[in-house]
Image (spheres, rainbow, N blue to C red):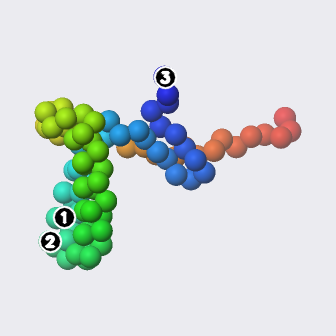
Amino acid sequence: MFARDVQINDTAYRRLDPEYFAWLRSRMLAVRSAVGSGRVVADAFEELRQNFYAVQEWALDTFGEATLRDAIRTTDPTTYRPPLCEKPEKTKLFP
């Protein structure tokens, strides 16, 4: 079994699963709302949207529409914990 999250340097990665997809989708909806209120420029959103559609296509092929819809319905984006970088522990060289 693989670890759910992997950190390489200062970037955290997570293998896409239905719940993570649902959380990512919620973030996309938040950005779309920010475009509507003028906080994000439309060109930036368009690039993000194209990238997300590629992820969405893979997720649909891998998990199926019913599984993704269920995850969207049941995943609470406010309590979902996305991958986060851990701060390195400070090591004592001398006692």
Q: Distance between the residues labelled 2 and 3?
A: 42 Å
Query: Are discs 2 and 3 less than 8 Å apart at CB?
Result: no
Which residue is tagged 3?
1
Please tell me whether mark 3 sits on a helix, a strand or a loop.
loop
Which of label 1 and label 3 is nearer to you?
3
Q: What is the quadrant of residue 79 in the picture?
A: top left
Which of label 2 and label 3 is nearer to you?
3
Which residue is tagged 1?
32
Horizontally, residue 23 falls left or right of residue 84, namely left
Residue 25, position in %: x, y?
A: 23, 50
Disc 3 marks a residue whose amino acid type is: Met
Asked whether 25 or 51 is in front, the reply is: 51
Which residue is tagged 2?
36
Horizontally, residue 6 falls left or right of residue 81, namely right
> Which quadrant, please, contains the C terminus?
top right
Disc 2 marks a residue whose amino acid type is: Gly
Query: Are discs 1 and 2 less than 8 Å apart at CB?
Result: yes
Asked whether 87 or 69 is in front, the reply is: 69
Q: Which of marks 1 and 3 is nearer the N terminus?
A: 3
